[in-house]
Amino acid sequence: MRITRRIGYHPVVALMLGLLLGHPASAALKSSETVKGHAPTVSGVTIIGTSGNPLEGDSLHSPGSQLFTDVDGDSEFNSLKRWYHSGDTTPVASGTSYRLTARDAGQTLQFGYTPATNPAITDPAIGVEVRSTASAVVQGLPVAASSTFTASKASVIANNSDTTVLTLTLKDSGNRPVTGIAVRLSLEASVVSGFSGGAPVLPRPLETAQGSGIYKATVTLGKSGSVGIINVTPKLSAGPLSVTPGSQQIAFVSPLSVTQVSPVVNAYSFGSGSGFPTTGFATAKFRVSLSDNNPTAYQWAVDGSNNGTGYTSVDTTGVVTLNTARSGPQVIQVKDKISGTVLASYTFTLTGWFTNNGNTTMTWMAANTYCSTRGELPLGSQLTTAVMAPTGGGGARVVGNLFGEWGHMGTQGAGFIGSNYWTSEVYARGTHYRVYLNVGAAGVADDILDGSIVFVTCRQGL
């Protein structure tokens, strides 16, 4: 503070003093002197940061006059408020706020505050500049030329476990990672098709490691209405984010399932819960159908063995071949080709295995002997649904017997003939029923006794 004090004397006194002291009277009439005060000060100079690391286009701020103090009570007047690149003496801007530009990328910023009072009435009028601590390193905005957006999978099963990982790799024009901005990133979904419940809310990408500039979000869906196709667009502070490509299209499909099973020859649709087949014979083939009708997209296996086992095999189209008898449940598995995850399965259990003697016919007694080392002659109900009667009707296509499951056995190419086969069921004394395995009808031998020559199939219980 500068204070000017004026001291005056009565004219008579001034004349006497002048004569005594040898000074002009006018000099004694008035005098002035300057008294110095205190320089103004500031404290607590800080920068109000942004959410996450500062980016080009952000604005930095610092509090203003509330930081100013002057012990002499003088008012602030034209204090200097300036922004610097840390360590520089030349300011880049003035004012209490500063909008970051591309030239600031890779730099840290400081706010400098030089307090001042009116130099016309105070002395000293200018205090010492106080600078804030440095900001975090300023980053350039991500640029599409070096920033990418990828999806680990474009098709996801909506089963609450299958996932796709969305990855943002963000770099600025100087090829520097853009880091520490997870709080400002988001993923916006827009519906292309499906999604009756509306677009899903997607998780925020998180940086994989500090300073990496790589952000990942794992997406999995499974609630009702979450089947369809969405476009996923990354956002920066709810606005555009420059990446290549600008969005990813993700399909969320219903969980894979087995829809039906059917013999390859004499096709007949059995449901996925039917248990077909319960009867088997060498080279018997059936097809497992999937909900997406795309069997070659998957790895097929039997009881955990890719492409099948010695007793049962499966090809890339989902066709299963029975090779040898096998007791107990068998599981046909549909796996993801990459991860090996089982996506769908079908279980069946054979209860009977059938062999035959080709086109060789036998009497009932010979047939019974022949089958005694191969199991036994089958019951009529193990061959067909037809009622055992001299002229029974045809059999139905149902699970649980040979004809019902496989149809016209003469077309199966496994040594069977589309004709009569002995059963172990007695019609009358000395006579047994036979079954026509072309239509599944029951009947008896042409003559009274079992001396008729008929084809033979044997059944081994499993």
Image: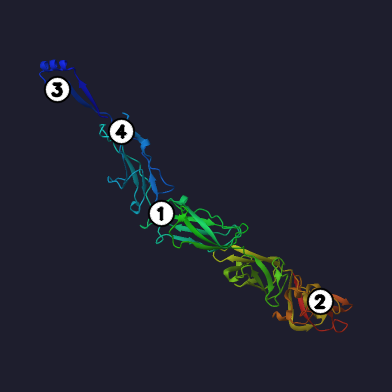
Secondary structure type for disc 3: helix
Could you say which quadrant of the image residue 369 lies in? bottom right
Q: Quadrant of the N terminus?
A: top left
Disc on the earlier residue, 3 or 4: 3
Residue 397 versus residue 128 in the image, above or below: below
Q: What amino acid type should be assigned to the residue bearing mark 4?
A: Pro
Q: What amino acid type should be assigned to the residue bearing mark 3?
A: Ala
Disc on the earlier residue, 3 or 2: 3
Residue pictured at 51% horizontal, 57% vertical: 188
Q: What amino acid type should be assigned to the residue bearing mark 1?
A: Val
Q: Which mark is residue 178?
A: 1
Q: Position of residue 294 (x, y in %)?
A: 60, 70
Tell which tag, 3 or 4, sits nearer the viewer. 3
Residue picked out by circle 2: 423
Is there CB contact under 8 Å for labels 2 and 1? no
Disc on the earlier residue, 2 or 4: 4
Secondary structure type for disc 1: loop
Task: Describe residue 369's horizontal placement relative to residue 19 as left or right.
Answer: right
Q: Position of residue 410 (x, y in %)?
A: 73, 81
Distance (Cα) linking label 3 and label 4: 36 Å
Distance (Cα) linking label 2 and label 1: 80 Å
Disc on the earlier residue, 3 or 1: 3
Distance (Cα) linking label 2 and label 4: 117 Å
Secondary structure type for disc 4: loop
Q: Which mark is residue 27?
A: 3
Distance (Cα) linking label 3 and label 2: 152 Å
Residue pictured at 68% horizontal, 70% vertical: 261
Disc on the earlier residue, 2 or 1: 1
